[in-house]
Image (cartoon, helix red, strand yellow):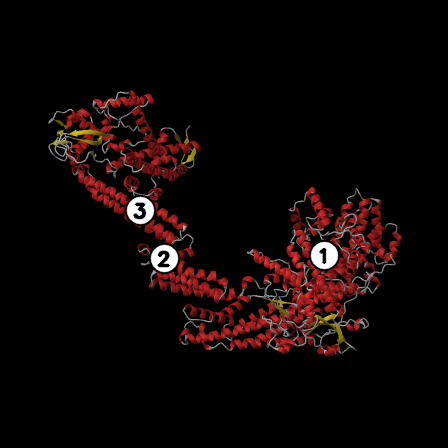
Amino acid sequence: MDNETTVPAAEDRTTIAKHNIEKALYQETQDIRAGRLKDENPLDKSADFRLLCDAARRGDLRLAQEQITKGVNTNARDEYDYTPLILASLCGHFELVQMLLEQGAKCERDTFQGERCLYNALNDRIRNLLLSYDYSKSTDPLQPLAGHITSLLTRDAPQTADIILHTADTSFRLHKFVLSARSPYFRRKLQEKPETKSWKLAPLIPTESFECCIRYLYFGDAFIRTLDREDEERSVLEGVDRLSRQLEVPQVFETLLNPGDRRQARQRRQDDVENGRDQLAAWFRGRVLQRKFVIDTDEVSQVTWTRDNPSFADVLLQADVDDESTPPEQESGIPIGPSLDMASRYAKPRKTLFPAHRAMLLRSELFSTMFASSFREGHIAPQTIDWAGRPAPNADDANEALQVVPVDCTAAVLEVILTFLYTENVSFPLSIALDVLHAADMLFIDKLKQRAALLISTLGNGTSSVVESELSRPGSQTPEEQSKEWIYEVIRSGWDCRVHRLEEFGARYLAYRLESYIGEPEFREIVRESAGRITRREETDTVELVDDIRYYLSERLRLRFEDAGLEELMEGHNVRDTREHEEAEDSELDKTTGETNDVNILADAHMNNISGEGQVVRTLDGEIAGDEFAQDAVNYQILLAKIDGLLEELRLDA
Amino acid sequence: MASLAGRGPRAKIRPPRRGLANNDIDFNDTWGVLEKAFLEIHTKNASALSFEELYRNAYKIVLKKKGDELYKRVADFEERWLAENVHKRVVNLLTPPLMMLDSTSGRSLTTTAEKKDSGEKFLRELRGAWEDHQVCMSMLTDVLMYMDRVYCQDSRQPSIFAKSMGLFRDQILRKPARTEMPILLDILTRIILDQIRMDRDGETIQTHLIKANISMLEGLYDSDQEVEDEKLYLTAFETEFLATSADFYRTEGERMLRESDAGTYCTHAKRRIDEEGDRCRSTLSESTAPKIQRVVEDELIRHKMKGLIEMDSGVEYMVDNDKLQELGFVFDLEARVDVKKTELTRAIQKIVMEMGANITNAAVAASATSAAPGTTEEQAEDKAKTGAAKVNQVTVAALKWSEDILALKDRFDNIWRQAFQSDQMLQIALNRSMADTINSFSRSSEYISLFIDDNMKKGIRNKTDAEVDSTLEKAIILLRYLQDKDLFETYYKKHLCKRLLLNKSQSISVEKQMISKMKIELGNSFTLKLEAMFKDMTLSEELTNGYKSYVNKLGDADRTRVDLGINVLTSMTWPLEAFRGGATADEDQGNLQIIFPASIDRVKTGFTRFYNEKHSGRKLTWQTNMGDADIKATFAKAGKDGKPRTHDINCSTYAMLILLLFNDLPAGASLAFEEIQAATNIPPSDLARNLQSLAVAPKTRFLVKEPMSREINPGDRFSYNENFKSQFVKIKVGVVSAGNKVEGDRERKETEKKNNDSRGYVIEACVVRIMKQRKVLAHTALLNETITQLSAQFKPDVNMIKKKIESLIEREYLERVDEAAVPSYRYLA
């Protein structure tokens, strides 16, 4: 599909000559041995990693996702120097390659492993995919977070700063929580006096040095402008040195002194950002998550947190207590807001309150709009600080209670969301995945939405779970053991939240188990819904879900007899024919009657199929058993016929 | 957090908390909440509202697939609000003075101040309404964010913000103010135009009010599709504005042309254009600036340029009075509308041609005053002196002509640089008209050559190298314009020849410099012959020296031996006829063997021998008429006290021969004119001229003529002047007409005839060259080709080319191609 666009791009990159690669590889090994460079593909002999590699070889999405969720390094290598990405691209598992890339696997040109990965790619489609994720073009997974925090330094509206630092000639509007999280010095000082609103810096330190340190603390690049005069530059450097010691962030000065080459600088920067993220995450766990508290709904209005709270929070987020004991039917569907009459329907409605920082919440588009609006939430009267750093003129405002902003989800989900916003970390149990998906949709956090969808679509199923094998594997706990309806919820959620991946996933899931679903009224209902969606869009008159199911059905069943055909019908033109789309399939089968034995069998099956329409499938299977392929062909025809029947029925209904 | 993840890979997927199947939110209740809040927003009472609550309500409605209904309700709400509240408020401010605007005669009743005042009120109110609407709608948009993102995108509806902007347009601007009245949009346009008119008339207006309203129009579109070039501003306002402005400036331009002078007009037009640009920035839209400026340019410049240039105080006046600045204005104006500056170019060309013609006429007139008596040769000879003076006068006229032409060029170059920004189009035009001016004067070739001659002889005396260079450059400039370069070459050769042979040139290096400049300008072939002349001069010098040492080696130190300085000239290169004076035709015998006295003849034969030894097979022809001689003459009573005194006399060779005759004569004897002629064989006219110098000119009267008269007539007798006295040791005998002067008519015809002859050859050669290459060529093509090839040398006359082709056919170089569709020729090898 995107061959046209990406292939030329691929062509104009010249392939690197072999001896150059070898030289680069040698250089790299030397560097790593000398400690100049970090090994980007460390050797990993753990069992989990081997599982990931196996999954990559087989294209098992679920297994792979499980290992990744466990925290296996996607960029590690096995004892044969294979990385999962190389394996997956070598074995031609497009979706798995995509999944790995989405979750941080690197394919970087100009590195040995990267070139190897590209070279090994089974087909152009995968190669182009790899190129499109080229590290130099794609961003560091932590970049959005780092970028956001850096942007806080220059962001004017909505105002989120709560402390002002004065240097000799400039003032900086900063955030206590960032300072406290990143600098041990500030953490101590602010712990002593959380109400501090301004801070004077030793006048001897140049503003430039301070700016550099602040930029570093805010996840930016530590650099200083090249100055005209050498002595100025030296004094700035000295200032940075002193500050980095005072603030206990020695890395600033180190980074400044050893820029290194491009790759080293990037690795260092990555380390810095990662390190910063860990600091922020730790702080977040200690000051935000641990300080959440549960109170009765009635008492929410009595909560009076001031700005001087030890979490430096400037807003409280309110979520419902996720009480597993409450039957979900009762809980669902009711919007639980601050209005009392709704909440009072329950025996003991309780809420969880999280202290939070607007500065971080801004990463959600909804919150960003909310805090910038002129509604109540937009008033950040408490402790707005003006340029000079004086407290707001109205002294009472400074002590005003923090606003409580309800978020319509459970505490667990809110925790996931906050964790993502503060740390870019997304991992949560499958059980709340749909809730996270909806909440992320509501809050316009696109990345979280995509990750939730990814989680559902990979963990919920894998390509390896073909019907027979699943049935024949009594020990496996498949999602099917719970009520079957969840898959419909997934599809509906996919529609509601406009995540196409979930629709596809649902269709595939259904296709692989169609015989157990096709008779159900819920199935009929969802097909009807899908049809309804389409008429509203006024597109073609196909039903998208059914099309998808048909496609995956052919993938499931036809793959098998196609392989068989390859072996046995070597000389026949049937090979070519059977490879064509399934529309041509029926007529093709008719035509080939009498050519070879195998074809005869196929034809027989076909005949049987026609004659046996409406009867129970499995008995037919039994009769022809002995030839798996023929069985698949029959099953395929039968299922297709059933779908057609269903559609006809629905159309009659409509 | 990580602890929550991935515990048990087979974790269950739970359905989301809110079963979507449940329909227990009541649309009307939820909408009620929203509607109430919207009302608060519109009454600017929103600060207490909770964004979260409103968003959540809207979100749920959309999630319940009621997005379409919500959308419709919001639109209805807005529509009602605009129609019922806002419209009324705005219309209330439409006071009678404003309503009068549409009637054309409406300005009578109300004063400008009143009109302005109420207009501003209206604009202010409308701006207020618009701004309120925008603020409210952006708040609504915030709250309805989810609906915009999900419902509007799915069902391809415009966003609610865009929709409400459309509602504002329909409910406010497109509603009639009151029944039977134009819609508000038209009224608004009219009010703004009225305000702008006041602004143009010099009143101060509230530009920010207009700007606000204009940006409202810019923010609104003609349809809900929001096509970029269908902004209301463009569809409703701009065209109207441009049309009104065109009217305004048309009348203003006409008035200005009638009432003020060109300079003022230019500054005014410039100011107006700038003003409109500023207005677009401060009051209207930036995007209109080019359009309105074009309108102003059209009305004030493009349509008026001709009138402006032809005004009494127009371009001609400006040039005459050196109004460089104002010319600059005119240029600027025209340059705005026309890259070619057609009108200005035409006007300037006309002026240049006129002024050039004046100069030419003056020159003709100056020469005519003298030429009139000089037309008949006899008369001129009657009064040789006055005639000579008049010839001089013509020369002066020629010099003046050159100077004037140069001054003209300088003047326009100056204008071109200072006022026309060194514009290329105008430069071309100026060059063309200069060339036309120069070439329309038939004697320009000669005059330019004379100009150079004069400078070579006198002009460059006491000048620095730079000045000399600029003088030469000037000459080259003139030359560049000249078309008949071959004619010029002829003249230049002639003049150069005289300068060289008579040692009149100030500096040979400057001469060479000039030649190299010409070489650059006109090419190698042009200067080939001129350079050959210089070469001859150098060779001759060597020869002279060689001869001297040769003679010395012979050893007979004969004191009476005559020294010989010789110039051997290649006969083809040198225009020797230049020395033959006027009467070449009479003097076919001109090269009759001049009879030399023995002493001279010895030298002559000696040299001839010497030369032939060096270059065998060459024939030396002695051009005695061009030589000069240094003689030591002793006069008996020349000293102060009557003692004999020796003078060094420099005179022409002929004069020397004549004087030598008297050496042998006994005292008191005399020779008749005829006797002298017989003894020397000097052509009579030359003889007469030389005798005139020797016997008539007071300073060099070595001979006494009988009878004493000014004219030399056959039969006159000459004798040695014993009483000659002079205080100078060295005496130079001038020969009449030795310098370069303007040719007489006869000479000129001669030159032209010769020139035409040589042109004929050049044309023939050219035609043959072309035909040799092409073999067959159509007549017109051949003509064109010939003209192009020759244009570097001169502009060939078509008739002459035709004649030459005829003659080539006769001589069987070419033949006519009979079967050709167009007349063609074929080359016969």
Q: Secondary structure at mark 3?
A: helix
Q: Position of residue A405 (x, y in %)?
A: 69, 73
Query: Circle 2 is placed at which residue position?
Result: B325
Which chain is mark 1 on? A
> Would residue B790 be visible to someone looking at this image?
yes
Residue type highlighted by circle 1: Glu
Label 1 Cα neighbours within 10 Å, binned few <14 / some 14-19 / many ≥20? some
Q: Is residue B479 left or right of residue A28?
A: left
Query: Circle 1 is placed at which residue position?
Result: A102
Quarter of the figure with residue A571: top right
Q: Secondary structure at mark 2?
A: helix
Work out whether residue B472 or residue B805 is closer to the camera in this orientation and state it.
B472
How far is disc 2 from disc 3 in space, using C-alphas?
A: 24 Å
How far is disc 1 from disc 3 in space, using C-alphas?
A: 83 Å
Q: Secondary structure at mark 1?
A: helix
Q: Is residue A150 left or right of residue A67?
A: left
Instruction: Pick the quarter of the image with the N terminus of chain B.
Output: bottom right
Q: Residue at x 87, y 54 (%)?
A: A621
Mark 2 and mark 1 residues within 8 Å of each other at the beta carbon: no
Residue type highlighted by circle 2: Gln
Q: Which mark is residue B257?
A: none
Number of residue marks: 3
Q: Position of residue A366 (x, y in %)?
A: 67, 68
Q: Position of residue B262 (x, y in %)?
A: 35, 60
Quarter of the figure with residue A414: bottom right
Residue type highlighted by circle 3: Ile
Q: Is residue B593 left or right of residue B711?
A: right
> Would residue B181 be visible to someone looking at this image?
no
Query: Circle 3 is placed at which residue position?
Result: B405
